[in-house]
Image (spheres, grey):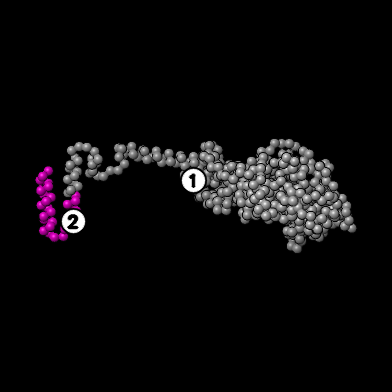
Amino acid sequence: MADDTSIFIGASRKPDDSYQRAEELLLRYGNRHGLITGATGTGKTVSLQVLAEGFSNAGVPVVCADIKGDLSGIAMMGEAKDFLVKRAEQVKLDPYQLQEFPVIFWDLFGEQGHPIRATISEMGPLLLSRLMNLTEAQEGVMNIAFRIADKEGLLLLDLKDLQALLANIAERADELSARYGNVTKPSVGAIQRTLLVLEQQGAANFFGEPALRIADLMRTTRDGRGAVSVLAADKLMMNPRLYATFLLWLMSELFEELPEVGDLDQPKLVFFFDEAHLLFEDAPKVLIDRVEQVVRLIRSKGVGVFFVTQNPLDIPEKVLAQLGNRIQHALRAYTPREQQAVRTAAETFRPNPDFDCATAITQLATGEALVSMLEDKGVPAMVQRTLIRPPSSRLGPITPAERSKIMAESPVAGQYDQVVDRESAFEILQKKAKEAQDAVAQAKQENSGGSRWTIPGFDDVLGTGNRRSSNRQTVAEAAIKSVVRSVGSSVGRAIVRGILGSLSRGR
């Protein structure tokens, strides 16, 4: 049975299906990362919930994505249902204690949790290019944009800052091309169009301030339990590229902000990445290399990363090699790709002479898994066919009323609700453009002799001098000439000519 140094996962079975031993995850190897795989409906979410409960009770904060809403139940006390009590007896979980856990709900859209925001600068050109699916040339322009922002002191906080900077770059394309390489207006225009698409998909909610403080993901309660940060991802999954980019950004921020701590008795934070295939799907090699680097090095910061996905083939081989703790639920094996996935999963385990691993993967029941955790000296244990223990918290989603109550009592309530829009690139560039426009207008006014409007022959109308009365006569003459044009008979025209003649003589 688990103690203060481990998390109880379940009980392995002998070939005759009798109890064999408790299967545990040693906390000191929680930062060696892990993998939870299996087909839909085989119990991956329950395994994730069990591990999250165990880490929380050990005082380790947890961050996890809630794709279907099922994981939200971890915030409420579980119910002693018959099938759960039976499973607790099978795995010798005595006593089977029901619990609720300290949960902080988050949501990029601010609907089912506290808003999460990051600035454009924090995201960086590489992740933004991935999010926007930019070409190599467009990515080059994005890198130039960040270089210019840094050099000219332009803060990039939200989408309108980046849009304003790109518009400025398009105006200075010739100047910048000579300094940084080819900057074309079509490339800038393509990036701007992509930004509009992102804005319509809700990315504008994510970029801005106040930005998420990593410390708020690493909270513990007064009784020593780690907070479970649950990210509502059902709506976010409608834009899978944003979901994957956000989670990669979060891992990168953890990697950059946390100090080196080496091997600890337990992790400082554990990160569960559900639907992990979205991170690697159609990703360029440079991005996959970045993920592999973060996964490999973040363990020294005391952070454990668990990937949750249906198929082990979804994870690149270099990343898969970093995942020491494995929970493999059932896989289907009807198509050639599925059969290959079963073979790949079986080959990643330390063999058990009591059963054939590949065959067992296709025969596992719901809530049953092949488990191999790291033992002493970090060596993978022999794979065991295991019944997963029942969770202590609620199975299934919570109600909107329960969610609202938890959010109102949250330790971060009110801290992220209001958007802050301080002076940044958009305001600075807008100010510079207005100053330039005013300077041009002033120069034109000075060049025109102080008068903005001129009328040929009427320059002295508003001034003083002898021409003022003459100008009045000229106006009168113009009026009479207009009458002439409107008089149709020759007699009328003669009369008018006589009047004009007398006026001329009167000068």
**Residue at screen point 30% across, 43% down:** 453
- For the C terminus, the image quarter is top left
Helix, strand or loop for the magenta stretch, by majority: helix
Horizontal side of residue 290 vs 47, given as left or right: left
What's drawn in magenta, residue-wise?
478-507
Q: Position of residue 6 (x, y in %)?
A: 81, 44
The one nearer the camera, 367 or 135, is: 367
Q: Residues within 10 Å of mark 1 (few under 14, many from 20)?
A: some
**Residue at screen point 89% across, 56% down:** 18
Q: Position of residue 80 (x, y in %)?
A: 79, 55
The secondary element bearing badge 1 is classed as helix
Going from the N terminus, do you reach mark 1 or mark 2 first? 1
Q: Is residue 280 visible?
A: no
Q: Residues within 10 Å of mark 2 (few under 14, many from 20)?
A: few
Q: Position of residue 471 (x, y in %)?
A: 19, 43
The kind of residue on which mark 1 rests is Ala
**Residue at screen point 52% across, 46% down:** 160
Residue that mark 2 sits on:
485
Q: Mark on residue 264?
A: none
Horizontal side of residue 154 vs 505, given as left or right: right
Horizontal side of residue 154 vs 490, given as left or right: right
Q: Is residue 434 visible?
A: yes
Horizontal side of residue 194 vs 112, given as left or right: left
The kind of residue on which mark 2 rests is Arg
Residue that mark 1 sits on:
167
Does 267 sit above or below residue 37?
above
Magenta stretch: includes residue 243: no
Does 226 sit above or below residue 278?
above
The secondary element bearing badge 2 is classed as helix
Spatial separation of the CA atoms under disc 1 and disc 2: 54 Å
